Amino acid sequence: MNSLPDNEDLRVFTVVVRKSSFAAAAEELGSSPAYVSKRIRLLEQVLGVRLLHRTTRRVAVTEDGERVFHWAQRVLDDVDHLMQEVAVTRQTPRGSLRISSSFGFGRQVVAPLVSQLVERYPGLQVRFEVFDRLVDVASEGFDLDVRVGDDIAPHLIARRLADNHRILCAAPAYLQRRGTPRNLQDLSQHDCLVIKERDHPFGVWRLHAGAQEDTVKVTGPLSSNHGEIVVRWALDGRGVLLRSIWDVAPWLQSGELVQVLPEWRQEANIWAVYPSRLSNSAKVRVCVEFLQAQLAPLDPGLARASAAPGA
């Protein structure tokens, strides 16, 4: 009887498929390309099939490899769930956890919480990555994406972590120089600071005032893919900004930014998003509950900031 595939070999194989590279897989796994190559070779020997086509630049998956990849994901998830179920308590998660988020929110808010998470649950090994694009958690191998924004694919599971919305604001110096917009369409005549971040359509602001919804196309001399840079430009008086209330609340309270067209806003709640195959994962559940508990105090602070004088 042939021996069964080793779980470590299956894990290495899934990473190679996701990365399409032995070197990139080795980097993620913290091992050498030679080790990765050896594990793949042993797995092919055990299964008796060729899993990968190797070229000088890239690794491609064979038809048999595609089938093995899907089964390997299920096997590894089942083993992971088994280990968590037989743990002393489901409140003590163990194992690796890959979390993603956006540049600004990830650095300022999520990263400190990840530090607290591993302090509370030392059995976790967390890999945290930030991106300027929307992450496909299912295909890119992430367990959890902490994102700002309400556009979430229906095949993913989403848990709301905190309420949030984006507002329009500018520095008093800019408004003194260029005037204050009186309606949404006035923004097309203003210098607007545009952020290309994750899934936001570039230069198209869709907002609502109560039940009314409208869209305006904006332009300006400055744009960036990094929200913190654009907030700095707004503080310098360079234009009108559309930004999450969690990010600009301190500047509204200090008066360095002033809210304009306060009746208009863009919903952008904070969510934990993960693949449906991880719906029963104890470590994901505990992580989401931890983030939810830590982020809940944000809500009252955001509400006070949006109602501050001059906002």
Image: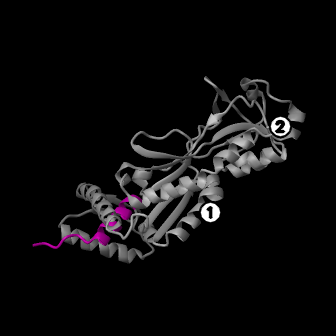
Q: Tell me if label 2 and label 1 are in contact, CB under 8 Å.
A: no
Which residue, given by chain and number where applicable, does mark 1 sit on? Answer: 112
Residue 195 point in image, percent of width and height: 66, 43
On screen, residue 102 above or below 119 = above
Q: Which amino acid type corresponds to the residue marked 2 in the rendered image?
A: Gly
Q: Residue at x 73, y 51 (%)?
A: 229
**Callout 1: SS:** helix
Q: The N terminus is located in which quarter?
A: bottom left
Q: Which residues are magenta?
A: 1-20
Nearest the viewer among 125 and 303 is 303
Q: Residue at x 40, y 50 (%)?
A: 275
Q: Is residue 4 magenta?
A: yes
- Mark 2 nearby-residue class (10 Å; few <14, some 14–19, many ≥20): few
Q: Left or right of 243: which side holds 9?
A: left
Which residue, given by chain and number where applicable, does mark 2 sit on? Answer: 310
Residue 310 point in image, percent of width and height: 83, 37
Q: How much space separates mark 2 and mark 1, taking CA atoms?
A: 30 Å
Q: Residue at x 63, y 35 (%)?
A: 266
Residue 143 point in image, percent of width and height: 43, 57
Q: Left or right of 40: which side holds 106?
A: right
Nearest the viewer among 127 and 80 is 80
Q: Which amino acid type corresponds to the residue marked 1 in the rendered image?
A: Pro
**Callout 2: SS:** loop
